[in-house]
């Protein structure tokens, strides 16, 4: 049996090599602290779990959901967007339930990218954007996110001919993996860029609620006329610590929402209705839970930033996400530094090169580890870097 040609273009799993190195350390009896993945360990708010349990008990919830999601869920999303962003949405035409936002992010390419079509993909970036473009037999064009530009794309550097051929531009702030934030002014520029070239602007707002120091993340849909070109993906995973439940939404441009709905209608049958009901409950009651979650990650962010500064790094505190994107010490590639941290500090950090060629020279730390383990890991990072890198 032979795999389809598109499968040959899919790069191996991001952390495959690193996992091997970790297994070797673990075989030696070392306990490794995993700061490489962003999967919150804090429990889901108990009220939300209780609500879900109740919803699971309702027999009518065990049947197929309407393909776009139940209307009460879509209305709750529209209400939340009005309250949170002052954005108005037609819950029937401009809101779609997703089985986690990753599902919609991957499937939107099938609706808009044909064989050989170009997709503008941020680099470094969440790996799904690129692989989903490849799965649709499209051609991902990497748009560099450089530190000197605050990890925002420089639209002037994209060749005009490439832009004119492009069907999709993906962006998302607060950004994974760089932890950079974007202002509404930048989002205006992005909408303008896409409007002029008739490109679908896909905005990944998975971290809209995970922000610090008073920063409030905007929605792309706050930009006037954004709905003409933009669709936004949002996720329940990170704000409510429910990565395993699978719940998200796509909102905005009607054509994009409808086309994504057609793709999904032919692949899945939407989200378990009990989970959608728990999602409604979270949207109506979750503000205080989110504040608690954010406070936990802010404390860890501060601890890690302080740790790295004391060790000899020059870094600033990110305004959002639960990541820290750190330039490797002089002479270290991403893989070198990840390996160093694994061997010397027993800490797993994600090599930036796994997020694209422009991620080379960085590693990503996440704050999704329990306090005690996290602080212990920080201590070891500080010691190893101070003694074996910055003392030289
Ligand atoms: C976690 C994450 C997602 C996916 O979230 P789900 O809703 O759990 O699928 C999407 N985009 C980014 C950038 C993420 O970090």
Image (tube, grey):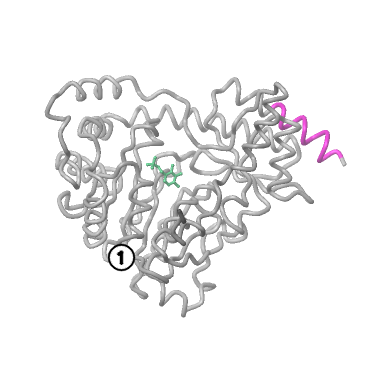
Residue 309, magenta (yes or no): no
Residue 158 point in image, percent of width and height: 51, 72
Work out whether 350 lies above or below 11: above
Which quarter of the figure is the C terminus placed in?
A: top right
Name the residue tied to disc 1: 229
Work out whether 23 lies above or below 177: above
Q: Residue at horizontal 43%, vertical 60%? A: 133
Disc 1, SS? loop
User: Which quarter of the figure has residue 24?
Assistant: top right
Residue 381, magenta (yes or no): yes
Range of residues picked out in magenta: 379-391
Residue nearest the observer in this picture, 158 or 117: 117
Residue nearest the observer in this picture, 371 or 215: 371
Residue nearest the observer in this picture, 352 or 137: 137
**Magenta highlight: main SS:** helix
User: Which quarter of the figure has residue 29?
Assistant: top right
Residue 264 point in image, percent of width and height: 25, 51
Residue furthest out toward the front: 1
Ligand 1 lies in quarter: top left
Residue 139 point in image, percent of width and height: 46, 67
In the image, taking residue 53 as reference, residue 177 lies left or right, namely right
Work out whether 255 lies above or below 304: below
Q: Badge 1: how crowded within 10 Å, few (<14), some, or many (20+)? A: many
Residue furthest out toward the right: 392
């Amino acid at each position: 049996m032979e795999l389809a040609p598109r499968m040959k273009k899919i790069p191996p799993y991001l952390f495959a090599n690193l996992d091997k190195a970790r297994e070797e350390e673990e075989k030696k009896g070392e306990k490794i602290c995993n700061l490489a993945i962003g999967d919150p360990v804090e429990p889901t708010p108990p009220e939300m779990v209780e609500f879900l349990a109740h919803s699971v008990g309702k027999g009518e919830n065990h049947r197929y959901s309407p393909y776009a999601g139940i209307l009460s869920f879509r209305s709750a999303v529209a209400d939340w967007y009005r309250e949170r962003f002052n954005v108005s949405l037609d819950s029937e035409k401009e809101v779609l339930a997703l089985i986690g936002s990753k599902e919609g992010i991957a499937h939107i390419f099938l609706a808009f990218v044909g064989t050989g079509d170009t997709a503008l993909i941020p680099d470094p970036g969440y790996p799904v954007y690129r692989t989903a473009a490849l799965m649709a037999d499209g051609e991902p064009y990497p748009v560099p996110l450089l530190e000197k530009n605050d990890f925002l794309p420089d639209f002037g550097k994209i060749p005009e001919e490439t832009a004119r051929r492009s069907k999709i531009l993906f962006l998302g702030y607060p950004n994974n993996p760089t932890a950079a934030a974007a202002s509404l002014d930048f989002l205006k520029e992005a909408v303008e860029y896409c409007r002029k070239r008739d490109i679908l602007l896909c905005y990944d707002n998975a971290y809209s609620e995970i922000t610090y120091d008073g920063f409030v993340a905007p929605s792309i849909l706050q930009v006037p006329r954004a709905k003409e070109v933009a669709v936004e993906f949002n996720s329940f995973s990170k704000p409510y610590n429910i990565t395993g439940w699978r719940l998200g939404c796509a909102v905005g441009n009607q054509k994009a929402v409808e086309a994504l709905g057609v793709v999904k209608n032919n692949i899945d049958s939407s989200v378990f209705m009990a989970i959608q009901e728990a999602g409604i409950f979270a949207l109506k009651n979750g503000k205080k839970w989110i504040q608690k979650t954010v406070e936990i990650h802010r404390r860890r962010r501060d601890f890690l930033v302080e740790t790295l500064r004391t060790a000899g790094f020059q870094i600033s505190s990110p305004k959002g996400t639960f990541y820290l994107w750190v330039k490797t010490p002089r002479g270290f590639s991403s893989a070198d530094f990840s390996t160093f941290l694994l061997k010397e500090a027993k800490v797993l950090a994600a090599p930036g090169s796994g997020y694209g060629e422009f991620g080379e020279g960085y590693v990503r730390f996440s704050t999704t580890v329990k306090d005690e383990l996290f602080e212990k890991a920080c201590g070891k990072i500080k010691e190893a870097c101070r003694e074996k890198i910055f003392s030289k």
